[in-house]
Image (cartoon, rainbow, N blue to C red):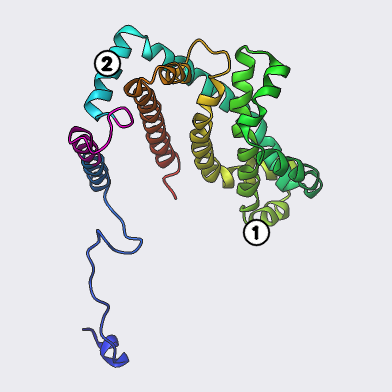
Amino acid sequence: MDTATRAAGTAPPPRRSSLWAFRGTLSRPAQVGIGVAASVGLLLAWEAVARLGLVNSLFLPAPSTVLNAMLVMIQKQDLLWHAGVSTLRVWAAFALAAAMAIPIGILMSSYRVVGAALEPIIDFIRYLPVPALVPLSIIWFGVGEGTKLYLLWLGTFFQLVLLVADDMRRVPQEYIEIAHTLGANTRQMLRDVAFRAMLPGLVDNLRITLGWCWTYLIIAEIVAADSGIGFVIWTARRYMKTPEVMAGVVVIGVIGLVTDQLLRAAHRRAFRYL
């Protein structure tokens, strides 16, 4: 107990393990190790439940059964090709949504008249359930690739544009005032000050909304599709092939996990100062 603590008449706070410290930190190897251990534990518990017959295998096949179904689908049903098609669709729709949402979101936050005009419309549309708009999308775009991209875009754009506007609003007003004092014009303030200040948060929100885009994949690929993971899952569902359905879901999860970790690593590397 140090002198200051004695003078105050209070005991020092009890030491807690850094592993359980409130808002504590963990090394990268520790995070990876805990994540792998938790995942393996979950898989073992799932395997045990399925093998012991506690749940009907029609509803919950064992992970080993799902893995075997996945290997067969890769060899005989072109699962990897379908995964590639779905990935291209998601990234195309997401790129279009981001290209539109970033400038619109910045304008909504920078100019109140733009925000006042667009926010009610965006708030209305973003609460509409995407599945309910499938019939309209077929009427507007037919049953081709355009409908699939539109549904993926629809589920992403209206969420992302508000996140971009919020990122822009979080840029400290002091930055804008200092740039204005130094003689920067509006374009310079937006490009060189505000955009750079909001960029870390923007990249993080892009990563999050990319995950949202994947959640609409099944909806997009049941519309007269003959390719994609959604098509594979929907076809297997018709014949109650639960292992194949879960194999398709697992493939989506693996693609999402790998993509998310790569984007996290790129974010840490690009914004080391955070």
Q: Is 254 covered by the magenta stretch?
A: no
Q: Residue at x 37, y 9 (%)?
A: 78
From the top left corner, tell me how far across and down residue 59 is, in percent. 33, 31
Q: Residue at x 49, y 29 (%)?
A: 214
Left or right: residue 5 compared with residue 142: left
Query: Which residue is label 2 attached to?
Result: 71
Query: Which residue is label 1 attached to?
Result: 174
Q: Report the Cα–Cα distance between label 1 and label 2.
A: 57 Å
Identity, as a three-letter code, of the amino acid under mark 1: Glu
Are dots 1 and 2 in contact, CB under 8 Å?
no
Camera-side residue of 28 and 157: 157
Q: Going by the picture, which residue comes out furthest to the top?
A: 76
Camera-side residue of 8 and 94: 94
Label placed on residue 184: none
Packing grade of label 2 (10 A; few <14, some 14-19, many >=20) is some
From the top left corner, tell me how far across and down residue 95 is, in percent. 58, 26
Residue 196, quarter of picture = top right
Camera-side residue of 239 and 106: 239
Q: Residue at x 23, y 34 (%)?
A: 50
Q: Is residue 90 visible?
A: yes
- Magenta stretch? 42-60
Identity, as a three-letter code, of the amino acid under mark 2: Leu
Camera-side residue of 208 and 3: 208
Residue 83, quarter of picture = top left
Q: Residue at x 36, y 61 (%)?
A: 23
Q: Is residue 185 visible?
A: no
From the top left corner, tell me how far across and down residue 15 is, in percent. 23, 72
